[in-house]
Amino acid sequence: MLLVYTHKITPRIKYVFKQICTRILGLPVSFTTTIEEFIAHDSLKMSYTRQPLGNEIFIRSSEFLFEQGLSDIEISVLLWEDTKCFFPAGEKSAMPFDIFAASFYLISRYEEYLPHVKDDYGRFTAQESMAFKNNFLDQPVVDIWACKFKKLLENNYPDYQFPKQQYNVIPVIDVPVAYEYKLKGMMRTLSGTFIDVLTFRFKRLYQRYSVLSGFKRDPYDTYKYIINKQKSSKYKFVFFFLLGDFSTYDKNINPQKQKFVSLIKHVADYCQVGIKISFFALTDIELLKEEKSRMEAIINNAILGSRQSFSKVNLPESYRNLVELEIPEDYTMGYVNHLGFRAGTCTPFLFYDLDFEVQTPLKVVPYQAIDFAFLKYNSLLDKEQALNRLISTIKKVNGTFVPVFHNYTFSKQDRWKHFKTLFNIILDAKKK
């Protein structure tokens, strides 16, 4: 066990030390404000305070983890070895910056509470983030810092047997629209037909009625392919189905249709299933409660977690609603148009509510890649290179890679050409 001496134990300190030491490195951690207890401890120990006590591992603390509430902090990002850092700690510190304050700033999403410009969907964008502005969005800096902290401990305690972490993958399949043509109902089918004719999309018109008459498979019906991949993979896939009512933003199948219900039940036999929260349920907890109940009634079990429509997370409201409804996990922490690490990490973490200064039970599972982010790469080679760089980066810190694909990503549409190849690269990547 690692014992940490500090002059004051705060919720922020307990939260971030447990994230870095326990969840990332697998080390149990405890805290003390008593010097005698610290001296008597005969295993891993360090001090996190203003001045070192003696010759122990000492990381000089900034004031950030002893504060409460929000303030507009001026942060200077510096180069450090092969990465970036901030909250400099001075010469006496064993690391040149306060790793714990910097990590807390990123995983608490402190910057998303501060004033910022949102996009057309009301989302916090990559361009607004400190990581993007300082060119470290492509690095899981929290995990990199944690690994360097582990080396510091290993150098000082060479006989201690440190736990070994393993690279992991959680493939996510997002289903905002289960079928392109099937189960849409008479009015939506006629409306689609009229639009096809009006816009001279006769190929689409032919495809629509070939599907409806049973001669062709629906383009979005890729579930057999995905389930076959699940059967041969060591990684457990997670599906998120949209069960919200039809609206301007959400256009899935009516959740009361038995064939749609049967599809979800079938998928749940092989994969884990959660709920994709509809756009209007993001700000309406009663609507969210109804959608959660619909899914639990279908799978006859508690849902695994959630993904939010359009990858929209507005802190703290979005996550508070999940906490209130006891939804255990969320898979929305990432960027739609950029590969990388929105929270600076590839390790799941618990949501910390900065307004109330409390750790919540909601596990945030950040994703690092979504299919849309690969569309800006023109060739398959460029896509593969970007993906392999990302996988290599996460493997180096033995992190968790969470890629997000949609059911229609595996269709034969030109836009998604070669995306099966990318999916296979992810599933077949071996640990070095």
Image (cartoon, rainbow, N blue to C red):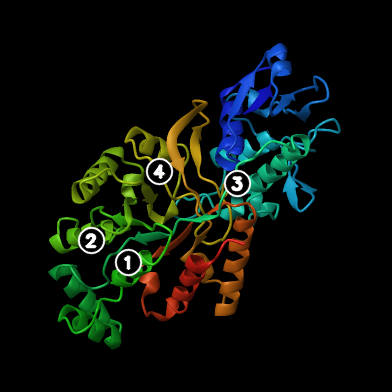
Indicate which disc residue 164 carries: 3
Query: What residue is rendered at 49% in x and 59% in y?
Result: 336
Q: Amino acid at mark 1?
A: Ile
Q: Badges 2 and 4: C-beta atoms under 8 Å apart?
A: no
Q: Amino acid at mark 3?
A: Lys
In this view, the mark in front (2 or 4): 2
Whichever of callouts 2 and 3 sits on the residue coming sooner in the sequence is 3
Whether residue 207 can be seen here: yes
Query: What residue is rendered at 25% in x and 46% in y?
Result: 291
Label 3: how many Cα within 10 Å (few below 14, some 14–19, many 20+): few
How far apart are labels 1 and 2 at the CA level? 10 Å
Q: Badges 1 and 2: C-beta atoms under 8 Å apart?
A: yes
Give the residue number, with chain letter if any, for mark 2.
266
Q: Badges 4 and 1: C-beta atoms under 8 Å apart?
A: no
Is 406 placed above or below 279 here? Answer: below
How far apart are labels 2 and 4 at the CA level? 22 Å
Give the residue number, with chain letter if any, for mark 1.
227
Indicate which disc residue 326 carries: none
Q: Position of residue 198 (x, y in %)?
A: 26, 82
Q: Is residue 305 left or right of residue 295?
A: right
Asked which secondary structure carries label 3, the reply is loop
Is 208 placed above or below 166 here? Answer: below
How far apart are labels 3 and 1 at the CA level? 31 Å
- The quadrant the N terminus occupies is top right
How far apart are labels 4 and 3 at the CA level? 25 Å
Q: Position of residue 126 (x, y in %)?
A: 58, 54
Whether residue 379 can be seen here: no
Asked which secondary structure carries label 1, the reply is helix
Residue in front for this viewpoint, 331 or 194: 331
Q: Amino acid at mark 4?
A: Glu
How far apart are labels 4 and 1 at the CA level? 22 Å
Residue in front for this viewpoint, 217 or 200: 217
